[in-house]
Image (cartoon, grey):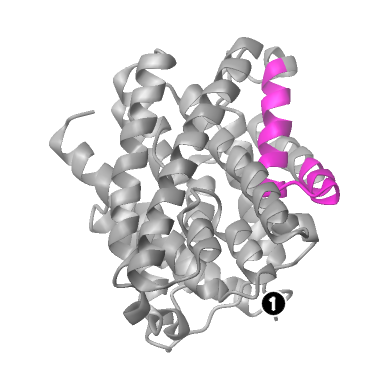
Amino acid sequence: MQLPPTPHIVLTAVLLAAGAAMGGIFQWIGTPLPFMLGSLFASALAVAFAQQRFPQDYAYPMKFRMLFVGVIGAMIGAGLTPDVAALLPRMLVSVPAILVFVLAAHGVNYLVLRRVGGYDRPTAYYAGSPGGLFESILFGEQAGADLRLLTLMQFLRIITVLTIIPVAMSIWEGHPVGSAAGLDFGTGETALVWVPVVLGLSLAGVWIGLRLKLPAGQLMGPLLLVGALSISGLVEIAAPGWLVAVAQVVLGTGLGVRFTGMTLAMFVTGAGLSLLSVSAMTAIGILLALLVHQAGGLPVDVLVISFAPGGVVEMSLIALSLAANPAFVTLHHLIRILFTVGEMSIVRGKGWF
Protein backbone atom coordinates (compact mmCIF):
# COMPACT_ATOMS: atom_id res chain seq x y z
CA MET A 1 0.00 0.00 0.00
CA GLN A 2 1.42 3.35 -1.02
CA LEU A 3 1.66 5.84 1.83
CA PRO A 4 0.50 9.45 1.32
CA PRO A 5 3.22 12.10 0.92
CA THR A 6 4.81 13.40 4.13
CA PRO A 7 3.18 16.88 3.90
CA HIS A 8 -0.22 15.17 3.76
CA ILE A 9 0.55 13.09 6.84
CA VAL A 10 1.80 16.15 8.71
CA LEU A 11 -1.25 18.22 7.76
CA THR A 12 -3.60 15.41 8.78
CA ALA A 13 -1.79 15.12 12.14
CA VAL A 14 -2.06 18.89 12.68
CA LEU A 15 -5.76 18.89 11.83
CA LEU A 16 -6.39 15.97 14.21
CA ALA A 17 -4.42 17.66 17.00
CA ALA A 18 -6.33 20.91 16.49
CA GLY A 19 -9.60 18.96 16.48
CA ALA A 20 -8.71 17.19 19.73
CA ALA A 21 -7.79 20.51 21.36
CA MET A 22 -11.02 22.15 20.20
CA GLY A 23 -12.93 19.10 21.37
CA GLY A 24 -11.40 19.53 24.83
CA ILE A 25 -12.56 23.15 24.85
CA PHE A 26 -16.06 22.16 23.75
CA GLN A 27 -16.15 19.49 26.46
CA TRP A 28 -15.17 22.10 29.06
CA ILE A 29 -17.94 24.39 27.80
CA GLY A 30 -20.43 21.52 28.00
CA THR A 31 -21.26 21.19 24.31
CA PRO A 32 -23.01 17.96 23.23
CA LEU A 33 -20.81 15.64 21.16
CA PRO A 34 -17.83 17.86 22.08
CA PHE A 35 -15.05 16.04 20.24
CA MET A 36 -17.12 15.50 17.12
CA LEU A 37 -18.36 19.08 16.92
CA GLY A 38 -15.07 20.54 18.16
CA SER A 39 -12.96 18.73 15.57
CA LEU A 40 -15.45 19.56 12.83
CA PHE A 41 -15.36 23.23 13.85
CA ALA A 42 -11.56 23.28 13.97
CA SER A 43 -11.05 21.65 10.56
CA ALA A 44 -13.81 23.78 9.01
CA LEU A 45 -12.03 26.90 10.29
CA ALA A 46 -8.76 25.62 8.82
CA VAL A 47 -10.45 25.12 5.46
CA ALA A 48 -12.06 28.55 5.64
CA PHE A 49 -8.94 30.53 6.54
CA ALA A 50 -5.92 28.47 5.50
CA GLN A 51 -6.99 26.30 2.63
CA GLN A 52 -4.54 28.04 0.32
CA ARG A 53 -1.72 26.61 2.46
CA PHE A 54 -2.90 23.02 1.99
CA PRO A 55 -1.00 20.82 -0.50
CA GLN A 56 -2.78 21.14 -3.82
CA ASP A 57 -3.73 17.47 -4.00
CA TYR A 58 -4.44 16.99 -0.29
CA ALA A 59 -7.08 14.41 0.57
CA TYR A 60 -8.11 13.24 4.02
CA PRO A 61 -7.11 9.54 4.50
CA MET A 62 -10.39 7.70 3.92
CA LYS A 63 -9.15 4.24 4.95
CA PHE A 64 -8.07 5.69 8.30
CA ARG A 65 -11.51 7.29 8.59
CA MET A 66 -13.18 4.02 7.63
CA LEU A 67 -11.63 2.23 10.63
CA PHE A 68 -13.18 4.72 13.03
CA VAL A 69 -16.53 4.61 11.24
CA GLY A 70 -16.29 0.95 12.19
CA VAL A 71 -15.53 1.86 15.80
CA ILE A 72 -18.70 3.96 15.95
CA GLY A 73 -20.69 1.10 14.42
CA ALA A 74 -19.23 -1.33 16.95
CA MET A 75 -20.17 0.92 19.87
CA ILE A 76 -23.74 1.28 18.57
CA GLY A 77 -23.91 -2.49 18.26
CA ALA A 78 -22.59 -2.86 21.81
CA GLY A 79 -25.75 -1.10 22.98
CA LEU A 80 -27.80 -4.14 21.98
CA THR A 81 -27.41 -5.97 25.30
CA PRO A 82 -29.61 -8.79 26.69
CA ASP A 83 -31.10 -6.24 29.11
CA VAL A 84 -32.19 -4.12 26.19
CA ALA A 85 -33.62 -7.14 24.37
CA ALA A 86 -35.72 -7.95 27.46
CA LEU A 87 -37.57 -4.67 26.94
CA LEU A 88 -38.95 -5.73 23.55
CA PRO A 89 -42.34 -7.02 24.83
CA ARG A 90 -43.10 -3.57 26.23
CA MET A 91 -42.40 -1.95 22.90
CA LEU A 92 -44.99 -3.62 20.68
CA VAL A 93 -46.75 -0.28 20.25
CA SER A 94 -43.85 2.15 20.39
CA VAL A 95 -41.58 0.41 17.86
CA PRO A 96 -44.12 0.57 14.99
CA ALA A 97 -44.65 4.21 15.93
CA ILE A 98 -40.93 4.81 15.36
CA LEU A 99 -41.33 3.64 11.78
CA VAL A 100 -44.24 6.06 11.36
CA PHE A 101 -42.06 8.80 12.87
CA VAL A 102 -39.14 8.09 10.51
CA LEU A 103 -41.33 8.17 7.40
CA ALA A 104 -43.34 11.23 8.48
CA ALA A 105 -40.32 13.20 9.70
CA HIS A 106 -38.25 12.41 6.62
CA GLY A 107 -41.11 13.40 4.35
CA VAL A 108 -41.64 16.71 6.13
CA ASN A 109 -37.91 17.45 6.15
CA TYR A 110 -37.65 16.73 2.44
CA LEU A 111 -40.45 19.18 1.70
CA VAL A 112 -38.89 21.85 3.94
CA LEU A 113 -35.45 21.55 2.36
CA ARG A 114 -36.75 21.15 -1.18
CA ARG A 115 -39.50 23.79 -1.21
CA VAL A 116 -38.26 26.29 1.38
CA GLY A 117 -34.51 25.73 1.16
CA GLY A 118 -34.41 25.15 -2.60
CA TYR A 119 -32.07 22.14 -2.27
CA ASP A 120 -31.74 19.68 -5.15
CA ARG A 121 -33.53 16.34 -4.70
CA PRO A 122 -30.62 14.15 -3.47
CA THR A 123 -29.39 16.82 -1.06
CA ALA A 124 -32.88 17.50 0.32
CA TYR A 125 -33.54 13.79 0.81
CA TYR A 126 -30.31 12.79 2.53
CA ALA A 127 -29.93 16.05 4.47
CA GLY A 128 -33.46 15.54 5.78
CA SER A 129 -33.00 12.05 7.21
CA PRO A 130 -34.15 12.03 10.87
CA GLY A 131 -31.13 10.05 12.02
CA GLY A 132 -28.21 8.05 10.70
CA LEU A 133 -25.79 10.95 10.31
CA PHE A 134 -22.93 8.92 8.90
CA GLU A 135 -25.16 6.71 6.78
CA SER A 136 -26.89 9.71 5.21
CA ILE A 137 -23.51 11.22 4.36
CA LEU A 138 -22.27 7.96 2.84
CA PHE A 139 -25.44 7.47 0.78
CA GLY A 140 -25.61 11.14 -0.14
CA GLU A 141 -22.04 11.10 -1.39
CA GLN A 142 -22.90 8.17 -3.68
CA ALA A 143 -26.04 9.95 -4.92
CA GLY A 144 -24.21 13.17 -5.80
CA ALA A 145 -25.68 15.31 -3.02
CA ASP A 146 -23.99 18.55 -1.95
CA LEU A 147 -21.94 17.25 1.00
CA ARG A 148 -21.41 20.72 2.41
CA LEU A 149 -25.14 21.31 2.81
CA LEU A 150 -25.85 17.70 3.75
CA THR A 151 -23.23 17.68 6.52
CA LEU A 152 -24.29 21.12 7.71
CA MET A 153 -27.96 20.16 8.01
CA GLN A 154 -27.27 16.83 9.73
CA PHE A 155 -25.11 18.47 12.39
CA LEU A 156 -27.52 21.36 12.80
CA ARG A 157 -30.25 18.76 13.38
CA ILE A 158 -28.25 17.25 16.25
CA ILE A 159 -27.26 20.62 17.69
CA THR A 160 -30.82 21.98 17.49
CA VAL A 161 -32.36 18.87 19.08
CA LEU A 162 -29.75 18.80 21.83
CA THR A 163 -30.42 22.45 22.54
CA ILE A 164 -34.21 22.35 22.51
CA ILE A 165 -34.97 19.01 24.20
CA PRO A 166 -32.85 19.41 27.39
CA VAL A 167 -34.15 22.96 27.88
CA ALA A 168 -37.77 21.90 27.29
CA MET A 169 -37.42 18.87 29.58
CA SER A 170 -35.72 20.99 32.25
CA ILE A 171 -38.70 23.35 32.18
CA TRP A 172 -41.10 20.37 32.25
CA GLU A 173 -39.31 18.67 35.16
CA GLY A 174 -38.39 21.85 37.04
CA HIS A 175 -34.65 21.03 37.18
CA PRO A 176 -31.76 20.58 34.74
CA VAL A 177 -31.66 17.29 32.86
CA GLY A 178 -29.28 15.58 30.48
CA SER A 179 -26.01 17.26 29.65
CA ALA A 180 -27.24 20.43 31.33
CA ALA A 181 -27.16 18.57 34.63
CA GLY A 182 -23.57 17.47 34.16
CA LEU A 183 -24.41 13.77 34.11
CA ASP A 184 -21.99 11.25 32.64
CA PHE A 185 -23.40 8.41 30.58
CA GLY A 186 -20.03 7.05 29.50
CA THR A 187 -18.75 3.64 30.60
CA GLY A 188 -15.61 5.18 32.06
CA GLU A 189 -12.03 4.07 31.51
CA THR A 190 -11.59 0.34 31.03
CA ALA A 191 -8.55 -1.90 30.69
CA LEU A 192 -6.41 -1.21 27.64
CA VAL A 193 -7.09 -4.76 26.50
CA TRP A 194 -10.45 -3.51 25.15
CA VAL A 195 -8.76 -1.24 22.62
CA PRO A 196 -7.36 -4.01 20.36
CA VAL A 197 -10.59 -5.98 20.86
CA VAL A 198 -12.76 -3.10 19.66
CA LEU A 199 -10.39 -2.24 16.81
CA GLY A 200 -10.22 -5.89 15.78
CA LEU A 201 -14.01 -6.28 15.80
CA SER A 202 -14.32 -2.99 13.92
CA LEU A 203 -11.92 -4.16 11.20
CA ALA A 204 -13.66 -7.54 10.97
CA GLY A 205 -17.05 -5.82 10.78
CA VAL A 206 -15.88 -3.40 8.09
CA TRP A 207 -14.55 -6.33 6.05
CA ILE A 208 -17.84 -8.23 6.47
CA GLY A 209 -19.93 -5.18 5.63
CA LEU A 210 -17.98 -4.40 2.47
CA ARG A 211 -17.72 -8.06 1.47
CA LEU A 212 -21.49 -8.52 1.77
CA LYS A 213 -22.06 -5.14 0.11
CA LEU A 214 -24.24 -3.96 2.97
CA PRO A 215 -25.52 -0.37 2.76
CA ALA A 216 -22.99 1.83 4.58
CA GLY A 217 -21.08 -1.42 5.09
CA GLN A 218 -18.20 0.12 7.03
CA LEU A 219 -20.72 1.11 9.70
CA MET A 220 -23.40 -1.56 9.41
CA GLY A 221 -20.94 -4.46 9.34
CA PRO A 222 -19.41 -3.72 12.78
CA LEU A 223 -22.84 -2.74 14.13
CA LEU A 224 -24.38 -6.09 13.18
CA LEU A 225 -21.33 -8.15 14.18
CA VAL A 226 -20.92 -6.61 17.63
CA GLY A 227 -24.70 -6.39 18.09
CA ALA A 228 -25.03 -10.13 17.51
CA LEU A 229 -22.21 -10.89 19.96
CA SER A 230 -23.55 -8.45 22.52
CA ILE A 231 -27.21 -9.42 22.44
CA SER A 232 -26.25 -13.09 22.73
CA GLY A 233 -24.29 -12.31 25.88
CA LEU A 234 -21.05 -13.71 24.44
CA VAL A 235 -19.27 -10.34 24.60
CA GLU A 236 -19.89 -7.32 26.79
CA ILE A 237 -17.95 -4.44 25.29
CA ALA A 238 -17.04 -1.41 27.36
CA ALA A 239 -14.63 0.62 25.26
CA PRO A 240 -12.50 3.31 26.93
CA GLY A 241 -14.13 6.71 26.76
CA TRP A 242 -11.06 8.15 25.09
CA LEU A 243 -11.35 5.67 22.19
CA VAL A 244 -14.83 6.94 21.45
CA ALA A 245 -13.47 10.50 21.69
CA VAL A 246 -10.68 9.63 19.24
CA ALA A 247 -13.25 8.22 16.82
CA GLN A 248 -15.23 11.45 17.09
CA VAL A 249 -12.11 13.51 16.36
CA VAL A 250 -11.18 11.40 13.32
CA LEU A 251 -14.68 11.53 11.86
CA GLY A 252 -15.35 15.15 12.78
CA THR A 253 -12.08 16.29 11.21
CA GLY A 254 -12.87 14.35 8.06
CA LEU A 255 -16.26 16.01 7.83
CA GLY A 256 -14.90 19.49 8.53
CA VAL A 257 -12.44 19.41 5.64
CA ARG A 258 -15.41 18.92 3.32
CA PHE A 259 -16.67 22.45 4.05
CA THR A 260 -14.72 23.95 1.18
CA GLY A 261 -16.63 26.91 -0.20
CA MET A 262 -19.06 27.17 2.73
CA THR A 263 -20.32 30.70 3.27
CA LEU A 264 -21.84 32.56 6.20
CA ALA A 265 -25.10 32.79 4.23
CA MET A 266 -25.23 28.98 4.06
CA PHE A 267 -24.88 28.75 7.84
CA VAL A 268 -27.57 31.35 8.52
CA THR A 269 -29.98 29.79 6.03
CA GLY A 270 -29.19 26.32 7.37
CA ALA A 271 -29.88 27.39 10.95
CA GLY A 272 -33.31 28.69 9.98
CA LEU A 273 -34.15 25.56 8.02
CA SER A 274 -32.92 23.38 10.89
CA LEU A 275 -35.12 25.18 13.40
CA LEU A 276 -38.14 24.72 11.13
CA SER A 277 -37.29 21.07 10.49
CA VAL A 278 -36.62 20.16 14.13
CA SER A 279 -39.79 21.96 15.26
CA ALA A 280 -41.82 19.89 12.80
CA MET A 281 -40.12 16.64 13.86
CA THR A 282 -40.62 17.44 17.54
CA ALA A 283 -44.33 18.08 16.95
CA ILE A 284 -44.63 14.72 15.16
CA GLY A 285 -42.75 13.02 18.01
CA ILE A 286 -44.95 14.58 20.70
CA LEU A 287 -48.12 13.56 18.84
CA LEU A 288 -46.91 9.97 18.49
CA ALA A 289 -45.78 9.93 22.14
CA LEU A 290 -49.28 10.92 23.24
CA LEU A 291 -50.86 8.23 21.05
CA VAL A 292 -48.46 5.53 22.29
CA HIS A 293 -49.07 6.65 25.88
CA GLN A 294 -52.80 6.19 25.39
CA ALA A 295 -52.32 2.79 23.78
CA GLY A 296 -49.60 1.33 25.98
CA GLY A 297 -49.48 3.39 29.15
CA LEU A 298 -45.79 4.26 28.81
CA PRO A 299 -44.69 7.60 30.35
CA VAL A 300 -45.12 10.56 27.99
CA ASP A 301 -41.84 12.27 28.93
CA VAL A 302 -39.81 9.10 28.31
CA LEU A 303 -41.58 8.57 24.99
CA VAL A 304 -40.89 12.17 23.92
CA ILE A 305 -37.16 11.57 24.57
CA SER A 306 -37.36 8.26 22.73
CA PHE A 307 -38.82 9.95 19.64
CA ALA A 308 -36.50 12.98 19.67
CA PRO A 309 -34.20 12.81 16.61
CA GLY A 310 -31.01 13.60 18.53
CA GLY A 311 -27.93 11.69 19.63
CA VAL A 312 -28.23 8.34 21.40
CA VAL A 313 -25.89 9.29 24.25
CA GLU A 314 -27.42 12.68 24.98
CA MET A 315 -30.98 11.38 24.87
CA SER A 316 -29.96 8.56 27.21
CA LEU A 317 -28.43 11.13 29.55
CA ILE A 318 -31.79 12.83 29.83
CA ALA A 319 -33.50 9.49 30.44
CA LEU A 320 -30.99 8.72 33.20
CA SER A 321 -31.68 12.03 34.91
CA LEU A 322 -35.41 11.23 34.83
CA ALA A 323 -34.78 7.89 36.59
CA ALA A 324 -36.05 6.19 33.43
CA ASN A 325 -34.41 3.08 32.03
CA PRO A 326 -31.83 4.52 29.60
CA ALA A 327 -31.73 1.16 27.79
CA PHE A 328 -35.38 1.70 26.82
CA VAL A 329 -34.54 5.08 25.30
CA THR A 330 -31.33 3.79 23.73
CA LEU A 331 -33.10 0.91 22.01
CA HIS A 332 -35.68 3.26 20.50
CA HIS A 333 -32.91 5.42 19.07
CA LEU A 334 -31.01 2.41 17.74
CA ILE A 335 -34.22 1.25 16.05
CA ARG A 336 -34.79 4.76 14.66
CA ILE A 337 -31.30 4.63 13.13
CA LEU A 338 -31.88 1.14 11.70
CA PHE A 339 -35.29 2.14 10.28
CA THR A 340 -33.77 5.27 8.74
CA VAL A 341 -30.87 3.35 7.21
CA GLY A 342 -33.28 0.72 5.91
CA GLU A 343 -35.53 3.34 4.36
CA MET A 344 -32.59 5.10 2.70
CA SER A 345 -31.25 1.75 1.47
CA ILE A 346 -34.56 0.91 -0.21
CA VAL A 347 -34.87 4.35 -1.77
CA ARG A 348 -31.24 4.25 -2.90
CA GLY A 349 -31.71 0.76 -4.32
CA LYS A 350 -34.74 1.90 -6.31
CA GLY A 351 -32.68 4.74 -7.76
CA TRP A 352 -35.20 7.36 -6.71
CA PHE A 353 -32.47 9.73 -5.50
Residue 140 lies in the magenta-colored region: no
Is residue 170 visible in the rendered image? The answer is: yes
Residue 324 in the figure: left or right of residue 174 = left
Q: Nearer the viewer, residue 311 or 263?
A: 311
- Vertically, is 267 above or below 223? above
Three-letter residue code for mark 1: Leu
Task: State the SS at label 1.
Answer: loop
Residue range in magenta is 22-48
Name the quadrant containing residue 228: bottom left
The residue shown at (60%, 28%) is 257
Residue sitting at 43 percent across and 85 percent down? 82
Residue 119 appears anywhere in the view: no
Q: Quadrant of the C terminus?
A: top left
Q: Position of residue 268 (x, y in %)?
A: 63, 17
Mark 1 crowdedness (10 Å alpha carbons): few <14, some 14-19, many ≥20? few
Left or right of 121 on screen, residue 219: right
Quarter where residue 91 is shown: bottom left
Determine whether 324 is above or below 172 in the image: below
Q: Which residue is mark 1?
A: 192
Percent x, y of residue 158 = 57, 42
Which residue: 53% across, 46% down? Answer: 65
